[in-house]
Image: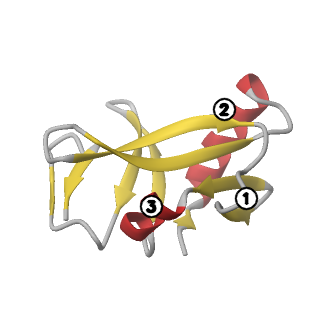
Amino acid sequence: MIEVTPSARERIRGMLSEENPGGLMRLGVIGGGCSGLQYKFRYEQNPRANDNVFETGGVRLCVDPKSYQFLDGMTLDYVDTILEQRFLFKNPNADKSCGCGKSFQV
């Protein structure tokens, strides 16, 4: 299960309404970044047959099975302060994360 905080839901809801009305957000993991794996977001119209689909507070997210093994148990948050605006990935599966928080290692 992936937990999505209210602030992350609100940000994703806004992104979807502007860029992909009626669609959903794909959350995944790809190779790369400072630590070996990095998080990715992508707009989708429909989930794939084998995707894990989550609906929380009116926001739909999908995750492919390969990425889900690295994201299961994660909390997705969003901060919007005077100094930064970004998603925060609180991932218990990550052994190490880079300073920017966009990549990790297992």
Q: Is residue 74 above or below residue 49?
A: below
Q: Which amino acid does label 3 sit on?
A: Lys
Q: Which residue is drawn at 86% across and 38% down?
A: 22
Measured in 3D between alpha carbons, the distance from the residue under mark 1 to the one under mark 2, in whole angstroms, is 24 Å
Where residue 104 sits in the image (x, y, percent)? Answer: 22, 53
Q: Give whichever of discs 3 and 2 has the lower sequence position.
A: 2
Residue labelled with disc 2? 15
Q: Is residue 30 above or below residue 4?
A: above
Q: Give whichever of discs 1 and 2 has the lower sequence position.
A: 2
Residue 49, disc: 1
Q: Looking at this view, is 104 or 7 the one in front? A: 104
Q: Which residue is drawn at 41% across and 70% down?
A: 69
Measured in 3D between alpha carbons, the distance from the residue under mark 3 to the one under mark 1, in whole angstroms, is 14 Å
Residue 66, disc: 3
Q: Which amino acid does label 1 sit on?
A: Ala
Q: Which residue is drawn at 21% across and 40% down?
A: 100
Quarter where residue 53 is shown = bottom right
Where residue 78 sits in the image (x, y, percent)? Answer: 48, 48
On the rendered structure, is 34 left or right of 23? left
